[in-house]
Image (spheres, helix red, strand yellow):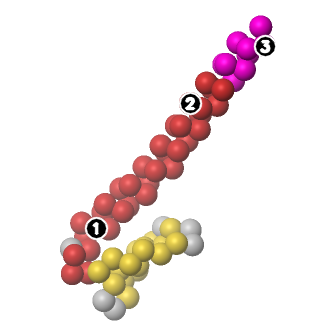
Amino acid sequence: MYLQYLGKYGFIKRETRFWKVPRQTNAYVSNKWLLKYSLKFPRLMKYFFVLGNSIFLHFRSVSNK
């Protein structure tokens, strides 16, 4: 992920998506917020994926008995 300022807007590229953040709305705070949550989101999704799989596998083995 990289940060690039062009003209009046700050552009943040993550994979193929762009978000426009007006510089007047304190770009540092808004970019910090986006970076903070964009890094936490994949970890959260991995957590729910692992948790969901373990619950699914547990109940599948219980129902086979």
Residue sitting at 56 percent across and 30 percent down? 51
Percent coordinates x, y for residue 41 in the rendering: 46, 50
Percent coordinates x, y for residue 9 in the rendering: 33, 84
Which image quarter is the C terminus in?
top right
Dot 1: element: helix
Residue under pointer 2? 51
Percent coordinates x, y for residue 32 in the rendering: 30, 63
Most extreme residue toward the bottom, as rendered?
A: 7
Residue under pointer 1? 30
Residue sitting at 21 percent across and 81 percent down? 24
Span highlighted in magenta in the image: 57-65
Cα separation, mark 1 vs mark 3, equals 51 Å
Q: Residues within 10 Å of mark 1 (few under 14, many from 20)?
A: some
Q: Residues within 10 Å of mark 2 (few under 14, many from 20)?
A: few
Mark 2 vs mark 1: which is more N-terminal? 1
Percent coordinates x, y for residue 36 in the rendering: 35, 56
The answer to whether residue 61 is magenta is yes
The reply to whether discs 2 and 3 touch (Cβ–Cβ < 8 Å) is no
Dot 2: element: helix
Dot 3: element: helix
Magenta portion: prevailing SS class: helix
The reply to whether discs 2 and 1 touch (Cβ–Cβ < 8 Å) is no
Amino acid type, residue under disc 1 in the picture: Ser
Mark 1 vs mark 3: which is more N-terminal? 1
Q: Residues within 10 Å of mark 3 (few under 14, many from 20)?
A: few
Amino acid type, residue under disc 2 in the picture: Leu
Residue 7, numbered circle: none
The answer to whether residue 56 is magenta is no
